[in-house]
Image (spheres, coloured by chain):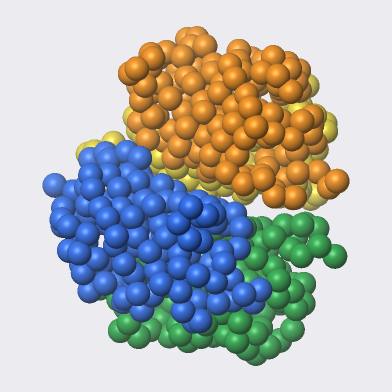
Chain colours: A blue, B green, C yellow, D orange
Amino acid sequence: MTAAEVEELIRAGVPMADDLGFKVDEVGQGYAHTRITFTERFIRPGGTISGPVQMALADASMYAAVLASLGKVEMAVTSNLSINFLQKPAPCDLKAQAIVLRLGRRLAFCEVRLLSGGEGDEQLVAHVTGSYALPAT
Amino acid sequence: MTAAEVEELIRAGVPMADDLGFKVDEVGQGYAHTRITFTERFIRPGGTISGPVQMALADASMYAAVLASLGKVEMAVTSNLSINFLQKPAPCDLKAQAIVLRLGRRLAFCEVRLLSGGEGDEQLVAHVTGSYALPAT
Amino acid sequence: MTAAEVEELIRAGVPMADDLGFKVDEVGQGYAHTRITFTERFIRPGGTISGPVQMALADASMYAAVLASLGKVEMAVTSNLSINFLQKPAPCDLKAQAIVLRLGRRLAFCEVRLLSGGEGDEQLVAHVTGSYALPAT
Amino acid sequence: MTAAEVEELIRAGVPMADDLGFKVDEVGQGYAHTRITFTERFIRPGGTISGPVQMALADASMYAAVLASLGKVEMAVTSNLSINFLQKPAPCDLKAQAIVLRLGRRLAFCEVRLLSGGEGDEQLVAHVTGSYALPAT
């Protein structure tokens, strides 16, 4: 699947991804690079992007990396997601780099790094791991 | 703080909670009972409530339990959140029961159970643990 | 399986459980109550029981709860384990209460509470969640 | 601190690390490379290195990376550890590559990759994230 196809599938299937303006920049075997464009609605007290927005981006990015690796597996579902919030993201676009750590028959394990800031000055703001239960084949 | 005050504070501060129609039913020292009312926008492929919606509810519920226990600590931020998705929630309201497992000086540890279905027929659909970094006092 | 059978199976199969003096007090459908007897070897700086000892107890306890629920499934393997260390356990016996939150066809999700101290004065010292991958049937 | 100093401090302070023959190969600002030498005692059913042994190595490796970055902070304690077991390690030495993702004032966040197999043929067998609570300064 191409980046555009992955983006369209996720935005069509997951309303929250659509609400957030989820974009897929690049995909390949085992990875996906994605982003959301900043809007005022993401803010929480302290002027930072809220945790749920970060988690939604991380989850959609894992899904993108799984789709990019396996093709269209709409019934894959997140089994576990664990996120460490490392520092407050600046009020700007948020990028995600998702990789598939291990693609088993039944579970795919992923890792996502959430990055804030412009090219060459990116800060790691959250680190996420998760597993996807794959449909029986 | 009362349930209404906690709800108002969270809905004012976290736009996503407001979007989801986050409600606080009951709070007390060390716990909060909350819910979101089902809408079609929560759905993902398979007819179930999406993972990000579940995570947003869990996060807001932990925050509610911390606020109920400590009073107004707006600058508390989620440090870690780990969720296990146990089964697909039905397309209906989703309730959350959050408790504070341990209130330390610097970190509050919480547990949240997400329940789906009507009174007397509730199913545990997700189990969440998380920690909140508390502002220095 | 009885508590004695579960204990024997785990101690025979997992050398570290045997080293720690792992004991199974009680098992039933969906749960296991276990313990380790304190020895000086568990200590780490600060006079508390080390994290790896707590994790080993939690892992063995989840395994006990799965065995108690499913019968002899030696090939079940831990897929994920997440532990929050809530407070330092006292230098005394450590008990574990493991429950199966959800028994699916392919994954079992468990929760474990680690308790320190004597009857009537127990402190929750760590909270653990984990998942077990079950062998295909 | 040098690799030898970090190794000595951890083996002196954490008996389980000493039991496992914990070795520190290399340390530097923000990282530590460590290993344990295989012995028959690590085995569990299926011929693989048990989960608790992997968790003990991961925990000691995070501690090594924190010590290497901050100097002697014996009172740092693990706050959270989350491990995904990706595949069964072969019955051979197990290496760990720990990095500090974020060093805050109060919490250090780490990531550890556990690798099995010889040079040039290493397999990622487990992925770990964790946080360390740092002593107040």
Q: Is residue D9 above or below residue B107?
A: above
**D10 sits to left or right of D114:** right
Q: Nearer the viewer, residue C43 or A38?
A: A38
Considering every residue shown, the one lying at the far front of the view is A120
Q: Residue at x 38, y 75 (%)?
A: A20
Q: Is residue B34 visible?
A: no
Q: Give the quadrant of residue A48.
A: bottom right
Question: Residue at horizontal 45%, vertical 56%?
Answer: A119
Q: Residue at x 37, y 21 (%)?
A: D122
Residue pictured at 66% horizontal, 61% vertical: B132
Camera-nearest residue between D83 and C56: D83
The answer to whether residue A73 is visible is yes
Whether residue A82 is situated above or below residue B132 in the rendered picture: above
Q: Residue D50: give x, y in percent of width and height.
A: 47, 24
Image location (x, y in percent) of residue C133: 35, 40
Residue C77 is situated, as x and y percent measured from the top left of the image, at 39, 34
For the N terminus of chain D, which image quadrant?
Answer: top right
Residue D57 or residue D41, whichever sits in front:
D57
Residue B30 falls left or right of residue C134: right
Q: Nearer the viewer, residue C10 or B98?
A: B98
Number of numbered discs visible in the structure rendering: 0
Task: Tell me where residue C39 appears, x and y as whole percent.
Answer: 75, 23
